[in-house]
Image: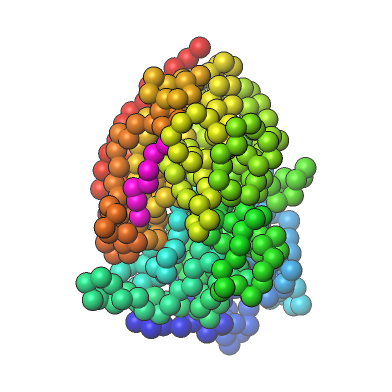
Amino acid sequence: MNIKFSRRRFLTTSAGALGVVAMPSLSRAADRPAVTHGVQSGDVTADGGVVWARTDRPAQMLVEVATTDTFRNARALPPIAALPESDFTAKMLVENLPAGQDIFYRVRFRDLAHSAVEGEAVTGRFRTAPADRRDVSFVWGGDIAGQGWGINPDDGGMVTFSAMRKHRPDFFLHSGDTIYADGPIQAEVKLADGKIWKNLTIPEKAKVAETLDEYRAAHKYNLTDDNLRAFNAEVPIFVQWDDHEVTNNWSLSKELPAAYKERNIALLAARGARAFHEMYPMRESISEPGRVYRRISYGPHLDVFVLDERSYRGANGPNLETEYGPASYFLGPDQITWLKRGLLDSRATWKVIASDMPLSLIVPDTPKGGSEAFAQGDGPVRGREFEIADILRFIKTAPVRNTVWLTADVHYAAAHYYDPNRAQFQDFEPFWEFVSGPLHAGTFGPNTLDNTFGPEVRFVKAPGKDSQNLPPSAGMQFFGHVRIDGASGQMTVTLRDRADVALWSTTLDPKFV
């Protein structure tokens, strides 16, 4: 199915799928501003969250919120502008909501040039964080539309989002690689068995993203998928970014491949960052506009520390420094100080550290033999590992109880138990790291483990070295599901595939000082 969207078709696909129709007084739906790519909510806490939508022209976003889906006694919020400067996206922080409550919202747009002209409303929902110790559940994963595997209607589209939606999670932790800006989407891909994978395509995804509009289009492409839009309307997102929001393995020393006419990596990163912040319902930082790292509290049992391992890193060099300095920066000193302070202040039962890259899996940056991640090989602490050693030592000595690391990036599922008795660096308490993904991309792995911090593989599901870059239709798409029991505080982590089959699970008992 070689389907190409026209610009009008691309802008209105989501709205049409959600039932937008023409008002009786107008002849066409195009005469009224439309919600073009569904609705999203994000960064939800006990008293509020962020609501996002996009339209097709200069307009005002009108939002109403209520505690029932009938919208009886709904509260109308002041309108905000959606302008060309933000690609007609708008996001609103909705506050003063009751804790532990299902919140229903609806969004419509009013034409800025004709104030009497309003489009049809699109509805969504989210659940505010609890004030009491009730059950909490969430899903996590990363990696969407990578390696040329786009939206294939014959395969059901982005099926993993449908599987995650069935669990009715409180939120979705997106671990990065929300797009593959460096990955063109071709109409057809020949599979190993001779069959043809058929992508929906748009002109902007025929090449690597370089302009701001091309970065924006990569995000909008994903939002043409029915499964993803339905998921977004019901499940708030806690989003972070990694490399493919800009280009593969980018750091400020990145040598761009020949496919790029724009050779300035800093400019590409700025454009990628702007598109990323426009397209997701993130709370914005006043102290550092565009900041990704943040702490999101979701009730007495859970604090989520969302890290940014891309913006403050040094060059992707050999990563073998024997002393900590700018060449070893991955999180950077300011973010590490913020993380330590937040962990120390947290009174939540569980502190989830959302890392967009694994701690001990070796991820090379070819062709010059550089390192993309923390790890670089067995042995003592070196390079970027100084930051992890510092954080782990702090967690032990503070002490901070019940930390769990969640990540994605490597395109397979795994569970790693870190034991100081197995490690080269031993000044830390045992902890778990869980890996999920890809949500909709090629499947790879497994990667080699670095023993500096003593990881032990308790579970792995990967295709093996002879079967790399498997398509989503092979079924090896993974997500993680976390459930915290309100009464006991126990955390159960389950790794699942896109058919929602539970592959592996463990239950962790909380420890208290």
Q: In this view, does 312 lie above or below 76?
A: above
Q: Is residue 187 magenta?
A: no
Which residue reaches farthest bottom? Answer: 27
Task: Determine the image quadrant of residue 502.
Answer: top left
Assign the magenta stretch its main secondary structure: loop
Q: In this view, does 185 lie above or below 477?
A: below
Q: In this view, does 363 lie above or below 227?
A: above
Residue drawn where x is 30% and y is 69% of the image? 155
Q: Position of residue 98 (x, y in %)?
A: 59, 37
Task: Determine the image quadrant of residue 117.
Answer: bottom right
Residue drawn where x is 74% and y is 49% of the image? 289
Question: Taking the image as drawn, is residue 192 in sight?
Answer: yes
Question: Taking the image as drawn, is residue 430 in sight?
Answer: no
Q: Magenta segment range?
A: 444-450
Residue situated in front as seen by the camera: 422 or 272: 422
For the N terminus, give its image quadrant: bottom left
Q: Where is residue 230 in the image (x, y as percent from the top left)?
A: 44, 60
Side (left or right) of 378 relative to 105: left
Q: Position of residue 121 (x, y in %)?
A: 57, 66
Which residue reaches farthest left? Answer: 193
Residue situated in front as seen by the camera: 74 or 187: 187
Residue situated in front as seen by the camera: 38 or 314: 314
